Image (cartoon, rainbow, N blue to C red):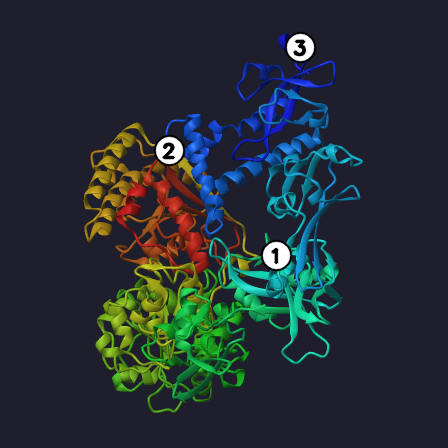
Amino acid sequence: MVEGNNKQMRFAILVSSDQFFDGIFQSALLKENSNGSYDVVRPISFGDFVTEELNETEKLLVKKTTNYLPETIFKLFVRKSKYSISTYNTEMAKMKAVYDDKANLRRNESIFAKILNYIDSQAKEIYSILAANPDILLAVRQPHAKQILQSDIFTITGEKSVVHPKFSYLPDGSVRYSMSISHSGQIIPLSNIERKDVKVVCTNPCMAVFMLENYAFTYGSRILVFENAKSTILNPFFSKPYIEIKQENVDKYCRSFISEMLSKFDVILEGIISETVNVFPTLRLTIDKSLNNQSILRPTVEYRFKEEDANENNNITFKYNLDNSAKGIEYVGMADGRPKFFIVKRNTDMENSILEDVLETGLTKYDNYLICEDNSSEHNIYQWISDYNGLIDNVIIDAPNFIPLEPRLVYHHDVIGDWYDLKMFVEVGNEKIRFKEIAMLIKSGEHIFHFGDGRFFIIPDIWFTTYADLAKVASASKTDDVRLHRSSTALLETVLEKKEIPTLTNVNVEVPEFVNASLRKYQVEGFHFLVNHYISAIGCILLDDMGLGKTLQTITMLAYVHRESVERRKRQPIPTSAPSDTTQMTQRSLFDDFEPTPVAEQNIPSTNDETKNLQASLVVVPAALLTNWRREFEKFCPSLTVYTHAGKERKKNLKFIFKTYDIVLVSSNLFQKDSHLFVEMMPETVVIDESHKLKNANTKFHQAMRGIKPHFVVGLSGTPIENSIVDLHSQFAIVNPYLLGSLSDFKKTYMKGDEISAESREAIGRIIAPHTLRRTRNEVLGDLPQLTEIVCSLDMDDKQAEMYEIEKSAARNEVMKIINSEDSGVKALTALIRLRKLALHPKMYEETYNSDNPKTRWIIDFLKEVQEEHHKVIVFATFSTYFNYLAKELEAADISSVIFTGETKNPDQVLDKFQNDDSVTAMLTTYQKGGTGLNLTAASYVIHAEQWYNPQLTDQATARAHRSGQTKPVTSYHLLLKDSIDEKIYNLAKKKRDVANGTLDMAKMSAEMALDLI
């Protein structure tokens, strides 16, 4: 009831008609009369002032009914010109004429059809509101009527109404089609109701107001809703009692229209035979495309049976969508003079059971189709078909052109020397495809192989892991065949049977008794790794962290290699003098300032005995480590005869040396210089310490290494990759040259330009895995004293900060100018060096600088403190000139230190003094000189005065102190100037450490990276 000025007014929903629509909902205000009738005061629409006095439900209905107004429909669907009622009527008449033209095949796509759909959607929403609010007055408003009578009022019931089509077969062979409806148990023939007494407010499903008061039914006028029927099915029967189908059209009518009606409605049949059959359902899954072009499975249910006494071709199949409740209907023609239909009885329980069986295999139902639970890739649905085709009871899968067979890799191979020539094919049914074609798809991540005739099959998911590495090699091959060296065990294992694979020797030999060391368990494993590769003559790289004893493991392996020579010398006394051509032979280090060692003390065997059959093993080490290696041989295996190729008096007759000694020890620099002497040698074993120095295949050192022909090569490195994955290839080009192929093939197979994907890194890792051994300090040295890493952030001195800001701006501008030039990376590094020097010590940047230096001040304060407790400290930096400034300031602070750089004249004495002289507190050394190969366990503190781009070099430097043999806890300090390049490099190094640990790969310096660091 409306309050205020409109008292005694009542809100109502009226159903009216116009020339275009049969039934339209309208909001109105009514005034009740004493006789029970109502006067229509006014229709109301959204925005009228009177709506403010309505309740929320009434306001909502007003808003919904406003959507029926001509102005609204004109705005939504016409929009050709300014609205007027005449323009509206003209345009609507044109559109309705198009829709009413039954010959127009696209009438259902016309604008008027869209308007009807719009009206239907509004009617359904309004009906839902009215059904939930039965107190709202509902009435039919007759055309132009100003009064609502009691007979015009109707109600809503939630009960659904049902249509009952009726088909009667008459003696003359015709069929009569009539229609009834039922509601609340009463059947009403439509022929009894006049069209004027029906107002259709929604066409699909049919929703209409039936004015039944006029027909003496037990209930009054109300809206009837026919859930599965459109209004068009009812309309013909308001004007006539039935439709008659002549005899000549009956057969066609039965096959089409009556069959469709039987499948949807409860049809009444007179004179027509219908036989219900009970058969089991089958679920047919048909491959299809969704609206977004995604491959899906469209499910349909089929009921198949064969008519009794019928021939072989008279099988009957009922098909319908899974969610459709329609019955299966099949018209089979005349039987006993009457039309006959078969009606299948649906078994929904079994249908659902079959669907559940399907969904348990990894499919999920979405709308009216099925997709894979993992629907990320197009091929997944076909992979599912391959996996389950024919395996689920009562399920048929239709996938035209798809071959649901598992492909099979077939091969045969020839062994030619150390090479395996593999001829590989993939068989799918009777088809045979070259493996190279499949390999190219695997490499690119494509799962579907297409034949020229449109057929296709799925490459199994497991092939993308099992054959991924082989596919990279095969797709890069210049021929259809794949040629693999016997060292490529990881690749060969993916194809060949175990008995065909050239496996590495796997023997656990005893550590030679003349090795003076007790090897840890992991060191014994490393020894076995090296020995088994030696026996198999397949090169390898020992990648243990610094400080784990790679030198000891290698010396133990060399002791095994030359064990027979040692044993023979034990049985045959060693002469106290050597032939004249060996009397001057001495074992020298890199440095020339020590006295020659007598021949007898070197255990040089006589050239007249038979104690030496093998050629000597060649050990190539950085110059700074030559003395350390010599000492390690003396310490751990003095029984081996060692010739140190060094000094001005080094021998030129290396053929004699290699026949006479067990070990030839040489620095990498001198090996390169004397490569013409080594080129004809055939060492039993070549050991390359710090093998990452081979990273550039164009260097003279790398070229010199390619000139010798050893039986076996082993590389030693804690940082096999410093800049690029190509570093690793360059090392294996010497150590195991056939494992990764040529550099061009390697790049073609695994790289895109200078970039390498994580997948390719993993593939390379799998290939080299059998021939690399890497243990970290944390894994195997659990009993080592604790290592503590501390980052110290220091504030710049004001003057230093001012200088740094000026240089930073200049460096940024400089890099921006050359960012696109070919040598931009080199020039960018030069700009970074200036910033690094300024951050380390301003005097390195400007000699006249005389203010405080925070790093030097921190180091002096720290060293004073630890000096009192007699601890030793290693200070690392990149620039050796820094130590000239630092040493003077330490001396002024009464702190004793030694400098160990490439310019040090007596390195052995310096190392010995630091290790053993308690008066020395600090050793100042560069990463390049002191960061690798040294055993400096006397130190318990490490200071990194500046940061380096390669975190592994920093870790190696720390490992000089924190290594096997250390008994004290070690603390490592990283000195970082706030807001400087120190922090940027440190953070970059952290990121690179994450990459290196997983993939042994690092990024190259570029101008863009330099800008980030600046």
Q: Three-letter amino acid code at disc 1?
A: Thr
Residue 16 position by quadrant: top right
Residue tagged by mark 1?
364
- Closest to the camera, between mark 1 and mark 3, is 3
Q: Three-letter amino acid code at disc 3?
A: Lys
The x and y percentages for residue 357 are: 68, 63
Q: Three-letter amino acid code at disc 2?
A: Lys
Residue tagged by mark 3?
7
Looking at the image, residue 723 sits to the left or right of residue 355; the answer is left
Say which residue appears at 53% left-offset and 39% top-offset: 116
One can see residue 635 in this view: no
Taking depth in this image into account, of 804 and 939 the one nearest to the observer is 804
The x and y percentages for residue 590 are: 29, 66
Comes first in the chain, label 2 or label 3: 3
Whether label 1 touches label 2, CB < 8 Å: no
Q: Is residue 38 above or below residue 878?
A: above
How far apart in space, not on screen, are marks 2 and 3 (Cα)?
42 Å
Q: How many marks?
A: 3
Residue tagged by mark 2?
80
Say which residue appears at 67% left-offset and 59% top-offset: 175
Q: Is residue 638 above or below residue 1002?
A: below
Comes first in the chain, label 1 or label 2: 2
The quadrant of the rendering that contains the N terminus is: top right
